Image: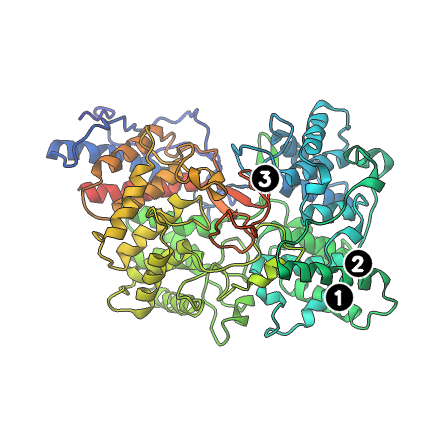
């Protein structure tokens, strides 16, 4: 085996970066760099299962160089406050809906407007459509219609070639009949769709008690926050018509009078019931001469929304409830100068707005806490000392971000003190289990270096108490709430998008188990951990893998579960563990890496297949390394070879989306996609919401390399 490194030079940790010490998201650096650095070159993939001392030394040398370079990249990109935040890219619905909202609100002087529109044009696919994720086999009807509308509003002529291509694509895919409810709402706001043909969201839902079969707290946190804002819009049915030259007549080829505005036919008994109820609500909204509780309901909904605005002006840390809150409150009479509205509008600037050479993207979400705690875990895996100033700054930021106020989670977990962490810059109303578990893991890893051990131990105590209180009845964890599993809400006509439930998942539960394991709680001494391990065992697929709810997909689920089982002191030589590892090896690519397409959420034959990515290679390696034996060393070394060879400027490049917001199943859980109640979507995931986390390509490979260095040492 030969490993070539730069002779006579110590490993270099210098790297290029777009930003240093600036509180903005980190974007992957260009492959061209003025900075030179150590290079860990290729080593042979034809290795025996056991290594000689010389081979082990050569491998470790190459790993150390790659690790030092990746640590240097993090050091160079850390902000002054101590956090990291990567650019979080989604799809053009985010920018398009902002453009439509600006028109509806009468705002025509926002300095970033032209640059936002520029990103929409940049994201158009060759066939004229817009997609949900990079490399999707087909475009998305909703993203394409909304992008077309936004460009039309921005003054782009219908006869421009790119507009003609978009229009032809829309009409060839069934036209406006195929759009989801959200898109219908946006068209109704500008007078291009009748409000009578939109599902109704009565504000009176706020009166329903928590014990009622359907109430606002039966919905997932993101759905709840969105629905409350849309109740204001749905009840008021506002319209600001487009001027004649910007109307969408060309999308109604048979004329508006002959357009089929109907919603998809329900397929279940409850679906038929709610469709019937929706017609009654529509008649009540449009024709009832007297609505005794409507005004009070609207006031209470507005108050509910305003009460949950975050300090940075956003709502729930994500775009949908935020943009709908601004529209809803505006229809309720709040002026653009009102402090709530002003703060909400200004929040769309940096750091939420992200400038690139292709224009200014509006992030659907931000991830400073998530990126920081995962970076801390990676630094610890790579052996970075806890007294390093970089680590100390990140620990200080993490401790400062622990939430001490209550939130919606207390409805299902009453009498529980706050203690979780959120994902974003500000989202105190909605801390999440995943961030909290990884934050606790990072703090435990670096506990010996805590400048104030009393403060850190109190944070750990509060955090674990909060985590345990959010455990669901099946002994596992969802992301934001306990027991958020009422399938009934999925049958409402409005709920034809993404997910409206937040049930427990294997990947979130795995992070909780890993954190508890780091605290010395395992399946032998802790009933909670043992029951959670049983849950994970029950969730294993027949081929040995696990479904990934919040990451793509089975590689993510499997890559997270195996380290958690190790932390829980499960026997890693058990047949079901070996089966999982064998599945990972069966998915390894010729180049040594791993990759899985987002399309695997709708086509299980694509499980574990797709373009190789550094993030998914990191997950697979973490899974194999968790077994702790040397039976898989050849596969592990091939994976390390891929990571070492593809590292550039201390990091990796990745265009593929490997983060999951919504698979598009509706119920938020692993779904047998052949069942009739699955939402109408194909491999394009038109009901889904996929994410490209810019830092996934960095800290997950770091974790894998750091653990591999220990493994081969």
Q: Name the residue under label 2.
A: 236
Q: In the structure shown, which secondary structural element does the residue marked by tag 2 occupy? A: helix
Answer yes or no: is residue 225 visible.
Answer: no
Asked if 626 appears above or below 44 in the picture, the reply is below
Crowding around mark 1 (Cα neighbors within 10 Å: few <14, some 14 to 19, many 20+) is: many
Q: Which residue is rendered at x = 69% and y = 67% of the image? A: 205
The residue labelled by disc 1 is: 298
Residue under the image location 24 percent in, 66 percent down: 524
Q: Locate residue 379 relative to residue 148 in the image: left or right.
A: left
Q: Distance between the residues labelled 3 and 1?
A: 32 Å
Gap in Å between the C-alphas at discs 1 and 2? 9 Å
Q: Helix or strand or loop: what does disc 3 sit on?
A: loop
Q: Where is residue 476 in the image (x, y as percent from the top left)?
A: 40, 63
Closer to the camera in the image, 628 or 349? 628
Name the image quarter holding the N terminus.
Answer: top left
**In the picture, residue 436 is in which quadrant?**
bottom left
How many callouts does the rendering have?
A: 3
Asked where in the image residue 222 lies, by quadrant, the reply is: bottom right
Pick whichever, 43 or 632, lies toward us.
632
Q: Are marks 1 and 2 in contact (CB under 8 Å)?
A: yes
Whole-percent x, y for residue 322 in the image: 64, 53
Secondary structure beneath label 1: helix
Please state, as top left, top right, bottom left or bottom right, where the C terminus lies in the image.
top left
Q: Is residue 261 left or right of residue 650?
A: right
- Pointer 3: what residue? 91
């Amino acid at each position: 085996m030969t490993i070539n490194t730069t002779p006579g030079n110590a490993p270099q940790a210098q790297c290029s970066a777009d930003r240093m010490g600036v509180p903005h998201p980190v974007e992957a650096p260009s492959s061209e760099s003025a900075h030179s650095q150590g290079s860990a070159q290729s080593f042979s993939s034809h290795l025996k299962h056991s290594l000689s001392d010389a081979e082990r030394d050569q491998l470790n040398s190459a790993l150390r160089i790659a690790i030092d370079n990746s640590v240097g990249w993090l050091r160079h990109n850390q902000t002054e406050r101590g956090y990291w935040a990567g650019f979080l890219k989604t799809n053009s619905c985010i920018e398009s809906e902002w453009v439509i909202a600006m028109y509806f609100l009468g705002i025509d002087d926002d300095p970033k407007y032209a640059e936002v529109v520029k990103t929409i044009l940049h994201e158009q696919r060759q066939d004229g459509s817009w997609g949900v994720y990079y490399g999707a086999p087909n475009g998305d009807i909703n993203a394409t219609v909304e992008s077309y509308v936004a460009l039309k509003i921005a003054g782009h002529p219908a006869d421009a070639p790119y507009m003609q291509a978009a229009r032809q694509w829309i009409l060839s895919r069934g036209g406006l009949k195929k759009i989801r409810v959200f898109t219908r709402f946006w068209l109704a706001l500008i007078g291009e769709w009748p409000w009578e043909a939109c599902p109704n969201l009565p504000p009176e839902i706020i009166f329903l008690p928590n014990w009622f079969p359907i109430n606002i707290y039966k919905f997932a946190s993101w759905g709840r926050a969105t629905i409350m804002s849309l109740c204001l819009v749905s009840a008021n049915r506002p319209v600001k018509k487009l001027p004649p030259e910007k109307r969408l007549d060309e999308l109604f080829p048979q004329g508006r009078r002959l357009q089929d505005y109907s919603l998809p036919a329900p397929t279940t008994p409850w679906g038929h019931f709610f469709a019937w109820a929706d017609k009654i609500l529509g008649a009540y909204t449009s024709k009832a001469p007297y609505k005794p509780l409507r005004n009070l309901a609207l006031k209470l909904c507005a108050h509910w929304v305003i009460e949950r605005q975050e300090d940075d002006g956003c709502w729930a840390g994500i775009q949908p409830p935020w943009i709908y809150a601004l529209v809803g409150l505006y229809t309720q009479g709040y002026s653009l100068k009102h402090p709530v509205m002003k703060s909400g509008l200004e929040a769309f600037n940096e750091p939420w707005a992200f400038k690139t050479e292709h224009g200014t993207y509006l992030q659907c979400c931000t991830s400073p806490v998530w990126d920081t705690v995962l970076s801390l875990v990676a630094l610890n895996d790579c052996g970075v000392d806890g007294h390093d100033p970089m680590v100390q700054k990140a620990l200080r930021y993490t401790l400062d971000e622990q939430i001490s106020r209550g939130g919606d989670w207390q409805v299902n977990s009453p009498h529980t003190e706050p203690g979780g962490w959120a994902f974003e810059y500000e989202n105190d109303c909605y801390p999440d289990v995943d961030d909290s578990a990884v934050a606790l893991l990072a703090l435990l890893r670096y506990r010996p270096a805590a400048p104030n051990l009393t403060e850190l131990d109190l944070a750990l105590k509060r955090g674990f108490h909060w985590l345990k209180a959010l455990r669901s009845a099946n002994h596992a964890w969802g992301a934001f709430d306990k027991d958020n599993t009422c399938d009934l809400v999925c049958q409402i006509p409005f709920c034809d998008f993404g997910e409206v439930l937040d049930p427990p998942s294997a990947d979130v539960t795995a992070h909780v188990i890993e954190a508890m394991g780091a605290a010395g709680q395992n399946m032998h001494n802790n009933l909670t951990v043992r029951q959670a391990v049983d849950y994970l065992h029950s969730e294993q697929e027949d081929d040995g893998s696990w479904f990934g709810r919040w990451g793509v997909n089975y590689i993510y689920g499997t890559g997270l579960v195996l380290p958690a089982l190790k932390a829980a002191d499960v026997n890693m030589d058990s047949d079901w563990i070996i089966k999982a590892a064998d599945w990972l090896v069966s998915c390894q690519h010729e180049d040594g890496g791993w990759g899985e397409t987002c399309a695997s959420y709708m086509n299980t034959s694509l499980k574990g297949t797709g373009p190789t990515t550094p993030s998914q290679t990191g997950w697979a390696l973490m899974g194999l390394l968790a077994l702790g034996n040397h039976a898989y060393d050849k596969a592990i070394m091939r994976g390390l070879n891929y990571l070492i060879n593809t590292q550039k400027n201390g990091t990796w490049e990745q265009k593929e989306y490997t983060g999951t917001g919504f698979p598009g199943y509706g119920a938020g859980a692993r779904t047998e996609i052949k069942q009739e109640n699955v939402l109408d979507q194909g491999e394009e995931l038109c009901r889904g919401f996929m994410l490209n986390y810019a830092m996934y390509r960095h800290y997950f490979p770091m974790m894998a390399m750091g653990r591999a260095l220990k493994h081969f040492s």
